[in-house]
Image: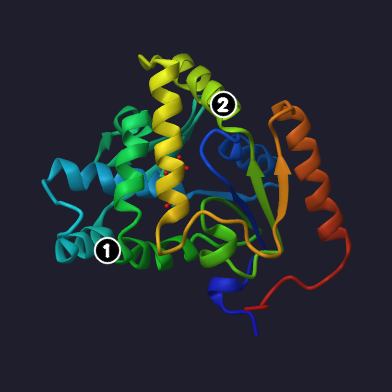
Amino acid sequence: MPTVENSAPVLAIDGPSGTGKGTIAGRVAGHLGWHTLDSGALYRAIAYVAVENDITPDDTLELENLTRTIAVEFVHTADGLNIWLDGRDITDHVRSESGGKRASIYAKIPVVRDGLLSRQRQMRTAPGLVADGRDMGTVVFPDAFLKVFLDASASVRAHRRYNQLKAKGFDVKLRALEREIADRDAQDRSRTVSPLIPAGDAIVLDTSEKGIGQVFAEVRKLVEDRLASGQDYLGQV
Ligand code: DC
């Protein structure tokens, strides 16, 4: 029987940084009229607050408490998703590349991942959820009706990220960014809990040679074909 937590369909979009996951998730959600979950933003916010409060990665008690109590809010704006914490807009602090690096370090810690599980699953509400991250299809929503894993070559991803950060006004250097992205990927792929890996039933799309419009069209087609196949995607956990 479907329960509150598995009663709406989920589209899981996973992959490393710079593959366009967030943009695709936002566009597909807009097209379907579904909710979005930017799970990376949650990890970025936790890491930001942890560092601000001198909570080190080995302080599991404090991290468990922080993960349970943190009051993060997501606000949709014309520029994308803004992240608010206790009445403060912390978007610029967490969206930087150093914010990603910090998030990747705290995301390795099991109490942080466990603590965020139910928070993420609670966002699964009707009519549906498009969730993007690293472990949406493998751990958080293993019964997602469709799992897409977006990938691209490291150099293409670094260029995309560079353009994205520049457009947002961040001062970035391409070479340094390439190194940081490679380090972050290695860390996300090699961790013992919920490593970045495609789910066995994920459809892997290499976006290196594709524009965002083409990737959106391909993902939309996958979604529509899957939904039209008439299977019951609810309550399969
Ligand atoms: O998607 P992003 O670049 O905003 O994610 C930032 C970091 O957060 C990423 O390097 C690893 C971590 N993360 C994670 O471990 N699991 C997720 N589902 C999402 C992000």
Q: How many marks?
A: 2
Q: Residue at x 51, y 65 (%)?
A: 140
The residue at which mark 1 appears reads as 68
The quadrant the C terminus occupies is bottom right
Residue neighbourhood size for the residue with mark 2, other residues' Cα within 10 Å, grouped as few (<14), some (14–19), many (≥20): some
Question: Residue 26: x and y, percent?
Answer: 61, 39
| Alpha carbons under labels 1 and 2: distance apart | 37 Å
Secondary element at tag 1: helix
Question: Residue 30: x and y, percent?
Answer: 66, 40
Q: Residue at x 40, y 57 (%)?
A: 191
Which picture quadrant has residue 97?
Answer: top left
The quadrant the N terminus occupies is bottom right
Amino acid type at mark 2? Ser
* Above or below 27: residue 130: below
- Of the pair 80 and 192, the residue shown nearer to us: 192
Q: Is residue 140 left or right of residue 170?
A: right
* Residue furthest out toward the left: 54
Amino acid type at mark 1? Arg
* Above or below 217: residue 161: above
- Disc number lying in front (1 or 2): 2
Decide which of tag 1 and tag 2 comes sooner along the chain: 1
Q: Is residue 37 left or right of residue 105?
A: right
Residue neighbourhood size for the residue with mark 1, other residues' Cα within 10 Å, grouped as few (<14), some (14–19), many (≥20): some
Q: Residue at x 66, y 59 (%)?
A: 127
Q: Residue at x 23, y 65 (%)?
A: 64
The residue at which mark 2 appears reads as 155
* Above or below 21: residue 79: above
- Of the pair 163 and 45, the residue shown nearer to us: 163
Q: Is residue 193 left or right of residue 52?
A: right
* Above or below 49: residue 210: above
